[in-house]
């Protein structure tokens, strides 16, 4: 099922067809991730599939990629717009040897790896919006959805799900996201090789994940903070049961966001949405 649709809207000759998996594998230099690639033309959600695989005992590093998702998901029951052949919908199974309290570090690790990959394609560092958005010019280019299965002592597995808008012009996005989203083709005016992008992403994740397990979180945390657009800025934090206004201070060693409230007290935020005050 090859869809040959010359993408002349962007003035390029590139064809938006299925991902060429062999091109992803060629030259893939990783230690743990991507040794096993599962590819689907369409799926409900790569995260849902990865979870099913992990529950059946699939090993660390298995990667699931789909051309389209019928129920692509974001956090808190939100959905991820997932049209075919233009983007990346990606999940990887991890079995980290970390205590459950450190599970949030994996989301931040993934955001650093993804920001590195994106920077190499757009030529400028994107901003990370805590905990999981990658923004360029204030617009969302990518998101990370981490889902874990833990007991009290150990993490059984973590599914790291990543969605990135690649060759998906903003003009073709549905209205619900058009004003707040962007894509690599919109930023660079060029379609990119999705194979090169996914290969680079798997390698960046492999490197950052190795660093997290072997060296610890500190140097990743510094790099995360360098990408964090809101340090020192006024923020509104929306949590399930209340809203807080304060100044973003950065993250702590457990990956929680530190916000100084209007009484000067530092609060740890472990879940919620953060917006700049001027938004
Ligand atoms: C996220 O959630 O940003 C995490 C998105 C993770 C998607 C990947 S795709 C592969 C894997 N399999 C899945 O099923 N999911 C993961 P959240 O912070 O809740 O943001 C969701 C919000 O982003 C939506 O409510 C929209 O406002 C916006 N949005 C939806 N689709 C988008 C898109 N393609 N580009 C930019 N923004 C989008």
Image (tube, grey):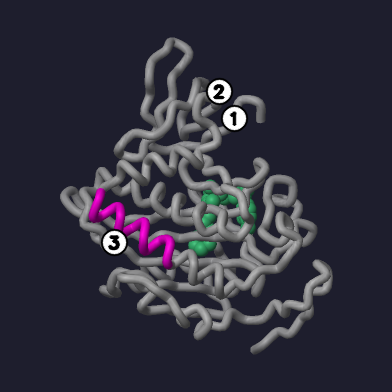
Q: Nearer the viewer, mark 3 or mark 2?
A: 2
Rendered location of residue 122, percent (x, y) = 63, 56
Quadrant for the N terminus, please: bottom right
Q: Which mark is residue 172?
A: none
Q: Which mark is residue 276?
A: 1
Instruction: State which tag comes first along the sequence, 1 or 3.
Output: 3
Q: Residue at x 54, y 47 (%)?
A: 133
- The part of the chain drawn in magenta is 203-215
Find disc 2 in the rendering and name its residue.
234
Find disc 3 in the rendering and name its residue.
157
Q: Is residue 141 visible?
A: yes
Seen in the picture, residue 50 relative to 253 is either above or below; the reply is below
> Rounded to the nearest whole Å, what is the CA distance between mark 3 and mark 2?
35 Å
Q: Residue at x 68, y 50 (%)?
A: 181
Q: Is residue 204 magenta?
A: yes
Rendered location of residue 154, percent (x, y) = 19, 54
**Label 2: few (<14), some or many (≥20) within 10 Å?**
some
Left or right: 205 in relation to 197: left
Instruction: State which tag comes first along the sequence, 3 or 2.
Output: 3
Residue that sits furthest to the left in the current view: 153
Residue that sits furthest to the bottom in the current view: 1
- Numbered disc 1: secondary structure: strand
- Ligand 1 found in image quarter: bottom right
């Amino acid at each position: 099922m090859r869809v040959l649709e010359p993408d002349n809207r962007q003035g390029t000759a590139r064809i938006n067809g299925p991902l060429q998996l062999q091109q992803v594998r060629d030259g893939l230099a990783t230690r743990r991730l991507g040794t096993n690639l599962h590819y689907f033309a369409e799926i409900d959600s790569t995260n849902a599939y990865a979870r099913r695989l992990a529950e059946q005992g699939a090993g660390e590093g298995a990667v699931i990629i789909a051309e389209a998702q019928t129920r692509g998901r974001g956090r808190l029951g939100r959905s991820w717009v997932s049209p075919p052949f233009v983007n990346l919908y990606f999940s990887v199974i991890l079995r980290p040897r970390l205590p459950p309290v450190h599970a949030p570090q994996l989301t931040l690790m993934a955001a650093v790896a993804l920001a590195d990959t994106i920077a190499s394609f757009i030529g400028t560092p994107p901003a990370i919006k805590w905990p999981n958005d990658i923004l360029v010019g204030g617009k969302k280019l990518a998101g990370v959805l981490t889902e874990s299965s833990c007991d009290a002592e150990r993490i059984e597995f973590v599914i790291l799900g990543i969605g990135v808008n690649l060759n998906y012009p903003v003009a073709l996005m549905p209205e619900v996201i058009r004003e707040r989203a962007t894509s690599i083709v919109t930023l660079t005016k060029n379609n990119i090789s999705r194979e090169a992008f996914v290969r680079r992403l798997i390698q960046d994740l492999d490197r950052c994940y190795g660093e997290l397990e072997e060296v610890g979180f500190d140097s990743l945390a510094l790099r995360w903070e360098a990408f964090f657009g809101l340090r020192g800025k006024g923020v509104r934090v929306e949590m399930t049961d209340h809203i807080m206004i304060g100044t973003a201070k950065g993250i702590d060693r457990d990956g929680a966001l530190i916000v100084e409230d209007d009484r000067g007290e530092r609060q740890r935020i472990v879940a919620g949405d953060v917006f700049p005050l001027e938004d």
